[in-house]
Image: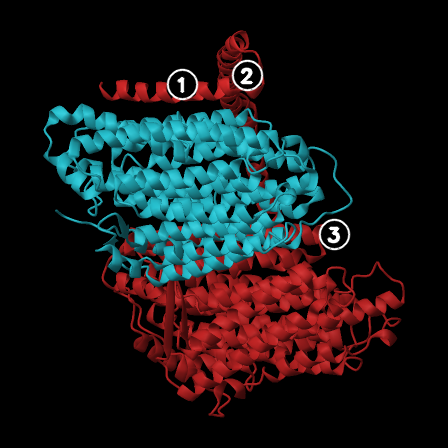
Chain colours: A red, B cyan
Amino acid sequence: MDNIFIIYSLLILFLPLAAFVIQIFFGKKLPREGDWVSVGAISITLILAISMFVMMLLEYNPDFRHEASFTWLDMGAFSIDLGFLVDNITVIMLLVVALISTCTHIFSIKYLAGDIRYSRYFAYLGLFTFSMNGIVLANNLISMYMFWELVGVSSYLLIGHWFEKDSAADASKKAFLTNRVGDIGFFIGIMLLYTAVGSFTFTDIFNGVANGMIAGTALTFAGIGLFLGAMGKSSQFPLHIWLPDAMEGPTPVSALMHAATMVAAGVYLSVRIFPILTPDALLVVAYVGGFTALFAATIAVTQNDIKKVLAYSTVSQLGYMILAVGTGVYTAAFFHLLTHAMFKANLFYGSGSVIHSMHHALHEKHDHETDPQDMRNMGGFKDRMPITYWSMLLSTFAISGVPLFSGFLSKDAILAGSLSFAQHHPEHFLLPVFGFGAAAITAFYMFRMMFLTFHGKPEMPELIEDIHESPKEMAGPLVLLGTLSIFIWYTLPYLNPLSSHGWFTHLVVPIDSVVPGNPSANSIEEGAHHAHGLAMYISIGVATLGIGLSVLMYLKKVLSAETWRNRAGFMYDWSLNKYYFDENYDKYLYQPTLRLAKKIAWIDWELYDKYFINGFGRVTSWASRVTGKFDYNIIDQIMVDGFGRIVDNLGGTLKKVQTGRLQNYLLYVTAGIIILMIIQSF
Amino acid sequence: MTNLQSLSFYYPELILTVVILAAIIYDLTLDKSQSGKVGWLLVVGLIGVALAIVFQENKVTTLFSDAIVLDPFASFFKLIVILATIFVSIVSLQSGELKAYRKGEYFTLLGIITFGLFLMVSTVDLILVYLSIEIVSIMSFVLAGYLKQNTRSNEAGLKYVVYGAFSSGIMLFGLSYIYGLTGSTNYFEIQHALAGLDSEANTAIVMAMILMIAGFGYKISAVPFHFWTPDVYEGAPTTITAYLSVAPKAGAFALMIRFFNQVLADGGGMGGLDSSSIATLPWPEIFSLLAIITMTLGNLVAIQQNSIKRMLAYSSVAHAGYMLLAMPVMSGDSMYAIMMYLVMYLFMNLGAFFVVITVQNKTGGETFDDYKGLGWEMPMIGIVMTIFMVSLTGLPPTAGFIGKFYIFASLIKGGNEFYWLVMIGGINSVISLFYYLRVVKVMYFEGESHEKIVQPPTVMAALLLATAIPTVLLGVYWTPIADWVQRSLVFFIQTL
């Protein structure tokens, strides 16, 4: 434990937990309900994460890697080691978590001011940060799985923060249950690998797979199992249904968990396990990701709730990352994770700032009917909220893939990867189509959101007087993260806006897959490099197309959105209603399951409980009653009292001292010894 | 090693002796109301003794001309005993029952019991076996009857005296057989001599061993030698009940393991009772039978009790049965399991008694009726008692589960002739669920909820946490204890 990285990691892991413990027990009693405890603890982790990051940059070594572990359970043949793995990916991810978490803490001070469960909110934020850091630091699947579940729990608690609202309570339940579906797959995957390899650590598993301890279909299933976990957490089709509903939670939580960190955990897992995914498993991954990217984008187009647009946009962007893993350019996936975390968190803070302001304005007017999140009630906020506007605009450029912004670089790398994949496997031409299609639609709906919210005439002119820029606790994170949407932060020390070449590409280098039959990291990179030029032109083209269409439709109003909506007909309805996924899941999954559960409950209650359990209870109680009767009637009444009566007859006064009973005991001892002696002779 | 040389290895016991003498003298200087200070003297002294033991933990040798041994196994049990003594000393200072009495002698006697238990866990000589059991017993008699103005306590003390005398008489009878058969009182020589006897002597050996089991069985309260337990546990001051349910039991198990492992099995090889030259004798059967009737009777009768103290008395009989389950195998795994179980049992059982003491201090009652609605009135008591009850039942994620897990695992590893013992052990755990959870039910679902919340006094609260936290923690992360037990499973062996 003499390693500074491990010590820093331990502190980063446990400081938020300490904040959680303090907040949950004493939060209410502390001044300002203890928000300073949480903010203080998280700020220290940010400082530690930054210093780790700087140390990593100073080393500037792609093979930088530290590991430490200890034995948790040792039961002879079965033992579980828990441990840390700190490499470049870990350090970058820790910084992302610490940075966004700190911003969220600071942002929440004002956003949640006056909330009845203010201290508990901060406690749960601490719990979440602890569990997320746990996932990031894990060097093995089992502790990753435990922290994975803890993340699920804290997500449940935070989505349901306002549990008095039925929609929030339902959303938290939905998020938790949908994640369980994926987690079952995750667990099966872990167990498949453990039975084959006999260890949970990444290193051992990679070595085991390289040595052929598990191969072929079994390995494909194990990989897909693990990927199912990633699908649940990263909200991939068809498990995407929980993320939009999760927007019921407070907006800073959406920024932290449902944009930047928790949902990225699935991508992080996929990046970590990439070397053991077989070609078949990778194909599944690629198609799930690609399809999700396009599919979620088509839903985002028609949403009117500002947070729903962002939610579907997150699903779509996560699909991109998963697509990148599937096509082999998994470092690009991690790159996009990093840039996306910054700009998407910022967009959520921006939407939070808008909603906060709307809420405030509606409150002034005593209007509790109007939905403060509906973009159809906004418009013309640009001059009232300049910081929010400009900051969100930067991030919108980034997500739309406009050159000079971070998203362009990472998205381009992903698209180049999928294009190269299709060039080598022409039968999978759909993958780049998904990618570029989603890119065009993304640019369109993001600008639609910006125009509807900030440009044009106010839809509710009576409100506009009360719309104000948010306080500095909320504006600060916006400015910071808005700045981080610009490309130079990711390409230093180089300044070429069209190439992602920089510290990131130097430090995060792909490693070869250990599965025989997968192309080497080198050949994948080479392919992507060749496709880079073409991908860039198409990508700029589709972005221009999307933005242009949006400008014509919502800014210049040359094209009527109304007409196009009617022309689209049923497609519009489907998109608006999210392709009726919730309704169909309800009809074909939940209701039949509920009916089955009721039947099983009937068997359990009417047959098993009534006859078996109660029967067992009756037998036990009968047996003990018999023993008790024996004790009372035979021993107490006949023998003890009998002896007492004899003593009474003989001496009389000795009865009160009850020595008779003691002698009786001695008699039993003697009898017991004699019985033992008799038994042994058989 | 000669007596004089041995002294330099005997300093933990020497320190303890000094502490005991100091306690007696210190008590003379104190008023009656101040006499509790002797308890703190004892606690500090015991911590010193513990440090001394830790310091010599890895020594393996015999002392005083092969009368006692010094090995990690003995050190392990000494530390367990010290931990229990420290816990009980501190809680005794808080006890309401003892308020009216001078406490100097009380703590001195606790110190002497500790000394007796030290002898018990390290002896390899029959004479010292008898002597150590007597030291512990006689001090226990006095302590059980310590509440001079309480007739129940007097009765408990008296019963204990007679019963104890009877049991040690029987054991002495057995010891004399062994001496007659082998001509020695030393374990190593006995083992050697027994192996040399022809099979005609088998009946005599078995007789002798059964008589000895009666003596050991009395100390661990195994059925049918347990009859003193409920009466003494109920009558004695609750602090002493808590102590008797843990420390002498640990000592007697150490004595029993060492005796049977050394004399009847192969000593250090830990190959089990089958590995000995007199393996044809029915040891596994006798121990299996004892274990089964002990836990079954303990559990069944515990269900019938109305007093929590008496219920815990029968529960401690049942737990002796669980530990006895591992005796028939007598392998390294099973000794390991018993030692693990004792650590877990120490925390959960002491904790349960501490709850009883806290409630007794407050209401003076110890029946189920006194616990009605307690979970709402004293939330802390409710929570920790629930933890202890769940742990005593053996449900995860508590220490009790891990203890049972290791016991059952050692049986399964022992071979399929022991599987049925696991089944009976499992069924017994289910039965015990009934009376343990009844406490929880009474605390939370009966009686009225109170507006006023009562917190236990600080020292009591600290003691409750000091037992409750390990009870939960060891259910989740027990590797340090497992390592410690593993290190301690080293016996002194002597080949003749």
Q: Can you tell which quarter of the image residue A39 is in? A: bottom right
Badge 2: residue crowd in 10 Å (few <14, some 14–19, many ≥20):
few
Q: Does residue B188 appear left or right of residue A470 in this picture?
A: left
- Name the front one of labels 1 and 3: 1
Label 1 or label 2, whichever comes before in sequence order: 2
Provide the secondary structure element on which disc 2 rests: helix
Name the residue at 43% across, 79% down: A4
In the rendered image, is residue A257 in sight? no
Label 3 or label 2, whichever comes before in sequence order: 3
Badge 1: residue crowd in 10 Å (few <14, some 14–19, many ≥20):
few
* Label 1 in the same subunit as label 2: yes
Task: Say which residue label 1 marks.
Answer: A667
Please say if the residues under marks 3 and 2 sit with CB atoms less than 8 Å apart: no
A46 versus B494 height, above or below: below
- Using the image as rendered, state which of residue B392 and residue B315 is in the foreground: B315
Chain where mark 2 sits? A
Provide the secondary structure element on which disc 3 rests: loop
* Label 3 in the same subunit as label 2: yes
x, y (%) of residue A552?
A: 69, 77
- Using the image as rendered, state which of residue B229 and residue A328 is in the foreground: B229
Name the residue at 40% across, 50% down: A188
- Using the image as rendered, state which of residue B151 and residue B264 is in the foreground: B151
Task: Say which residue label 3 marks.
Answer: A164
Name the residue at 63% across, 31% down: B367
Quarter in which the C terminus of chain A is drawn: top left
B262 versus B17 height, above or below: above
Residue A654 - label = 2
